[in-house]
Image: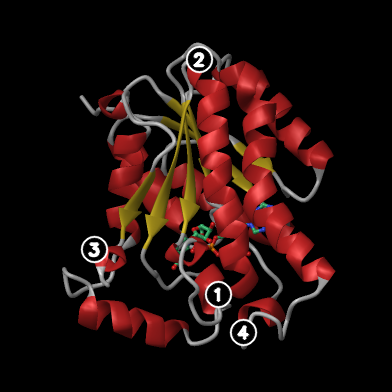
């Protein structure tokens, strides 16, 4: 029996086969969880429906986190199928392209800053708030995805790093707020993985090469590596862990 048997998980952020959310869905399904999915727009609908079918699910709900009404509608829709939710996976991030290339100030505008924070950071708390009634008292677990650029100044990551810092602080405040009702909140800080979101970051291949040469494990990580840790963190095996940022980066973050 898998260690997520009997758990129900909502997975956001599948945009392609390579999405980290796909690795997470695969591991959670393998461990026995029942899954539901969201898709950002009509372009992604059929892709997410295919992925869902692969994981034995027919719950596929539209969700653009930029829209408050869609956040409410998504949870309402989920509530028609499930009477409770055990796991919420937030695997969503976005910043306008010109803000994640060149110097931090080059692509900086009030609007780019707002969008990066709205989509990449605020959406976690907004989803947590909407899902709260469905998650209360179930030893539930919320998980998001962060990156080392939240705490170190990394070339090109720019405003996304500032948004990830807000995301990581949100993890701690959500953990404090939701802990008394039994819900845990954690993040995985993943090493670079070639996905659609990553392709938007200038010099991404160079970053990947650097990790492969210098990380203690001398390799980059895969969506399977991240998926396995995500499944563990959202399971009762991790019942004592909340408010944490867990690195799945082949050890890269420990380098001086
Ligand atoms: O190296 C990497 N790939 C890392 C990614 C290292 C460390 C962390 N991360 C984070 C990302 O910042 C993100 O938070 O992991 C999370 C998942 O990213 P991913 O799997 O690397 O990227 P991708 O497959 O592109 O999925 C992210 C998806 C979007 O994809 P695109 O590329 O189409 O923007 O987030 C979704 C969307 O499907 N997304 C939204 N979903 C709902 N509403 C929205 C939105 N407004 N915007 C983006």
Q: From the viewer's perspective, is the residue at label 2 or at label 4 nearer?
A: 2
Q: CA distance from mark 2 to mark 4?
A: 41 Å
Evaluate whether residue 138 shows in this view: yes
Question: Dots 1 and 3: beta carbons under 8 Å?
Answer: no
Q: Which residue is mark 3?
A: 251
User: Which badge, 1 or 4, comes first in the chain's sequence?
Assistant: 4
Say which residue label 1 marks. 157
| Element class at badge 4 | loop
Disc 4 to disc 3, C-alpha distance? 25 Å
Mark nearer the N terminus (1 vs 2): 1
Q: CA distance from mark 2 to mark 3?
A: 32 Å
Q: Please identify the residue farthest to the left as the structure is shown.
A: 217
Q: Earlier in the sequence, mark 2 or mark 4?
A: 4
Quarter holding ligand 1: bottom right
Mark 4, other Cα within 10 Å: few <14 / some 14–19 / many ≥20: many
Nearer-N-terminus badge (2/3): 2
Nearer-the-camera pick, 57 or 113 = 113
Compared with 75, 114 (above or below) is below
**Which residue corresponds to the image point at 52% horizontal and 14% vertical from the top-left?**
181
Residue carrying label 4: 101
Q: Would you name the residue on which mark 2 appears?
A: 180
Left or right position of 10 against 249: right
In percent of width and height, residue 21 lies at 46, 52
Which badge, 1 or 3, comes first in the chain's sequence?
1
Whichever of labels 4 and 3 marks the residue nearer the N terminus, that label is: 4
Secondary element type, mark 2: helix
- Residue 77, compared with residue 246, is above or below; it is above
Distance from label 1 to label 2 (Cα)? 35 Å
Residue sitting at the far front: 256
Q: Are marks 2 and 4 in contact (CB under 8 Å)?
A: no
Q: Give the distance between the C-alpha atoms of the residues marked 1 and 4, in whole angstroms.
A: 7 Å
């Amino acid at each position: 029996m898998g260690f997520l048997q009997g758990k129900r998980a909502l997975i956001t952020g599948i945009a392609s086969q390579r999405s980290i959310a796909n690795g997470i869905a695969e591991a959670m399904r393998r461990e026995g969880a029942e899954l539901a999915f969201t898709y950002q727009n009509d372009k992604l609908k059929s892709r997410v429906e295919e992925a869902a079918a692969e994981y034995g699910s027919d719950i596929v709900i539209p969700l653009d986190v930029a829209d408050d009404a869609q956040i409410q509608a998504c949870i309402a829709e989920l509530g028609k199928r499930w009477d409770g939710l055990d796991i919420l996976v937030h695997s969503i991030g976005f910043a306008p392209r010109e803000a994640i290339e060149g110097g931090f100030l080059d692509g900086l505008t009030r609007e780019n800053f707002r969008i990066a924070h709205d989509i990449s950071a605020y959406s976690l708390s907004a989803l947590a708030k909407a899902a709260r009634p469905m998650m209360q008292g179930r030893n539930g677990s919320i998980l998001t995805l962060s990156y080392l650029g939240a705490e170190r100044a990394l070339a090109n990551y720019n405003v996304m790093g500032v948004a990830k810092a807000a995301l990581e602080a949100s993890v701690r405040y959500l953990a404090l707020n939701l802990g008394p009702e039994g819900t845990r909140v954690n993040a995985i800080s993943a090493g670079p993985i070639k996905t659609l979101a990553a392709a938007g970051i200038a010099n991404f291949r160079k970053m990947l090469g650097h990790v492969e040469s210098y990380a203690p494990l001398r390799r980059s990580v895969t969506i399977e590596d991240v998926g396995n840790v995500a499944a563990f963190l959202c399971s009762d095996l991790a019942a004592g862990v909340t408010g944490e940022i867990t690195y799945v980066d082949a050890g890269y973050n420990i380098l001086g």
